[in-house]
Structures are given as C-alpha cells and as structure tokens.
Image (tube, rainbow, N blue to C red):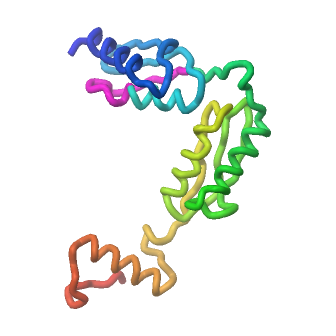
C-alpha cells in the first residue's frame, strides 16, 4: 500500500465515523507514521478520532496534535469541571468512595490521582471524566494497590478465593489435583 492510499483510507475513515467531526482534522503520512493536526469540539471526539486512525491497517504510529476547541458558549470553568468530575466518580459504584482525587487546571486539563485496588477501577475513573463537557485532556495518575496480583494476600479467605478462581480458570475441578500458593 502506498502512503497516498494509506492517507486516503484514513481520511475516508475520519469522514465515515459519526462519533466526531473530522472536517477540521489534517492528515500527513510518512513511513506509516500518521500525523494528525487540526481541532475537534471535545476531548471525547479527540479520542474517537485517534481510535478511528488506529483501526486502519498500515498505521504503525500516530503523532497527535489535535486541539480541543469548545464553542465559546460552552466554555466551562475549571471549578465546574472539578465539581462534576468528583460527582461522577462518587456516583460510580465500581470506584471506592474517596479513593480518587481530582485536579483541574489549564482550562480543562484533568489530573486524577489516588489509589484503588484494581485496574478496572482506575480505568473507570478515567472513562467517567473524559466525556465531561469542558475537559481538554486527562492524566491518569491513579495507583493500584499492591496485593492480590503480586501474591501478597494477607487474609487466608482472600488467598483461598484467588486460588479457587485460578484453578477454576485452569479447568481443575478436584481438590486432590491442586497445588497451593506458597
């Protein structure tokens, strides 16, 4: 495939995807590296545009320079974004209460910090905030507590639950066939 054909495939995908307006996105292709420039109306649209380009066969890397430009009337103050971000995280039943801190600065850039037990909780917090109006970007600095994944389970019941889940996933049904975690 030529770089011209790859560029055209990307442009076609950007025009086809209804989850964002690709009208103001520029595409340059050089050695299977795609550079995206221009602007979109929200952070969620920016992520959707990047995901659309990743779907194209032949794209090896993406240099993203897409700016988020909210319409003037939809400009949201950082304090309003922070309030909405913490509210939506508090409403998410998958995220432990009080585990995530929110910092909003530089006209809509959100930084998430804190500590959670599982990766899915870290990801859920980011997913919750990135779709809020006014958000220009998200830095996810939420840490995951060491523990179950590293074999550092202190509670005997938790250790047994982890062992049972692992053996079940491996298809072992008999207690006699099991080994235990030392």
Q: Residue at x 54, y 54 (%)?
A: 122
Farthest residue, direction top: 4
The C terminus, quarter of image: bottom left
Farthest residue, direction front: 18
The image shows a total of numbered marks equal to 0
Q: Residue at x 25, y 89 (%)?
A: 175
Q: Residue at x 79, y 39 (%)?
A: 79
- Magenta span contains residue 65: yes
Residue 71 image offset from top left, x and y in percent = 68, 19
Farthest residue, direction bottom: 176
Q: Is residue 68 left or right of residue 76?
A: left
The N terminus, quarter of image: top left
Residue 169 image offset from top left, x and y in percent = 27, 70
Residue 167 image offset from top left, x and y in percent = 28, 77
Q: Residue at x 32, y 25 (%)?
A: 59
Magenta segment range?
A: 53-66
Instruction: Please say if 37 is above or below 61.
Output: above
Q: Is residue 8 left or right of residue 65?
A: left
Instruction: Please say if 8 is above or below 32.
Output: above
Quadrant housing residue 16: top left
Residue 143 image offset from top left, x and y in percent = 57, 56
Instruction: Please say if 79 is above or below 112.
Output: above
Q: Is residue 19 left or right of residue 132?
A: left
- Magenta span contains residue 38: no
């Amino acid at each position: 495939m030529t770089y011209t054909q790859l560029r055209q495939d990307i442009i076609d995908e950007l025009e086809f995807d209804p989850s964002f307006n690709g009208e103001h996105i520029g595409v340059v292709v050089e050695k299977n590296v795609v550079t995206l420039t221009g602007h979109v109306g929200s952070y969620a649209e920016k992520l959707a545009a990047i995901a659309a380009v990743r779907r194209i066969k032949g794209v090896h890397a993406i240099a993203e320079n897409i700016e988020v430009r909210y319409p003037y009337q939809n400009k949201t103050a950082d304090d309003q974004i922070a309030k909405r971000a913490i509210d939506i995280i508090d409403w998410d039943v998958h995220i432990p209460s009080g585990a995530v801190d929110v910092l909003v600065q530089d006209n809509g850039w959100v930084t998430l910090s804190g500590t959670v037990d599982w990766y899915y909780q870290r990801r859920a917090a980011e997913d919750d905030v990135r779709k809020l109006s006014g958000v220009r970007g998200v830095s996810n600095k939420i840490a995951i507590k060491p523990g179950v994944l590293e074999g550092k389970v202190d509670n005997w019941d938790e250790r047994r639950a982890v062992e049972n889940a692992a053996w079940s996933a491996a298809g072992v049904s008999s207690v006699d066939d099991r080994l235990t975690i030392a």
